[in-house]
């Protein structure tokens, strides 16, 4: 089951990166990791650094994909983003958190939703 979820997540991240490029995002990095966890996609749109969380599901039986973003996950992503900025020595730039919500059917995305500025940084 974990392997199936990981495959679904990986497929969703590929779909999201392609979708974001079509939306004029420049992908800087995928799967940035630190001891706190992982940022799915780091991108640039206009003058902003965008930390993108990708949520992929096969059904809405347990809610929409974007509804799976808990307070703890948002807090962890906020800390990861600060770590990323420090590690890359990026200062004085606009940053935000976007979410790409994907519903898959038979390994194909049948619904993609981009939520810009999905949540504020949580510390």
Image: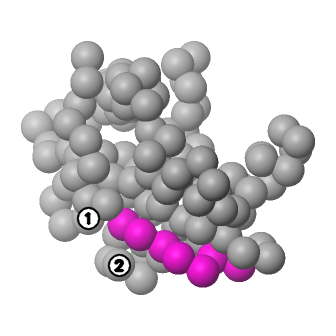
Residue 49 can be seen in this image: no
Q: Position of residue 9 (x, y in %)?
A: 68, 53
> Mark 1 highlights which residue?
45
13 above or below 88? below
Image quadrant holding the N terminus, namely: top right
Q: Residue shown at 44%/46% (left/top)?
A: 67
Residue 1 shown in magenta: no
Residue 110 shown in magenta: yes
* Whole-number angstrom distance, CA of label 2 to CA of label 1: 9 Å
Which region is colored magenta?
A: 108-114
Q: Position of residue 66 (x, y in %)?
A: 44, 51
Give residue 82's quadrant in the image: top left
> Mark 2 highlights which residue?
23
Image quadrant holding the C terminus, namely: top left
Single out the mark in the foreground, 2 or 1: 2
Q: Nearer the viewer, residue 89 or 35?
A: 35
**Left or right side of 51 for 11:** right
**Left or right side of 46 for 54:** right
Q: Position of residue 90 (x, y in %)?
A: 25, 36
Give residue 115's quadrant in the image: bottom left
Q: Secondary structure at mark 2?
A: loop
Q: Which mark is residue 1?
A: none
N-term-proximal mark, 2 vs 1: 2
Give residue 57's quadrant in the image: bottom right
Residue pushed farthest left?
92
Q: Nearer the viewer, residue 72 or 88?
A: 72
């Amino acid at each position: 089951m974990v392997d199936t979820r990981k495959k679904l997540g990986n497929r969703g991240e590929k779909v999201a990166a392609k979708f974001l490029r079509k939306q004029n995002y420049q992908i800087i990095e995928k799967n940035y990791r630190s001891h706190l966890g992982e940022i799915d996609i780091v991108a640039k749109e206009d003058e902003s650094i965008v930390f993108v969380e990708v949520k992929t599901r096969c059904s809405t039986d347990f809610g929409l994909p974007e509804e799976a973003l808990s307070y703890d996950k948002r807090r962890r992503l906020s800390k990861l983003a600060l770590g990323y900025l420090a590690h890359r020595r990026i200062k004085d730039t606009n940053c935000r958190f976007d979410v790409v919500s994907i519903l898959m059917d038979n390994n194909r995305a049948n619904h993609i939703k981009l939520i810009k500025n999905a949540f504020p940084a949580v510390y």
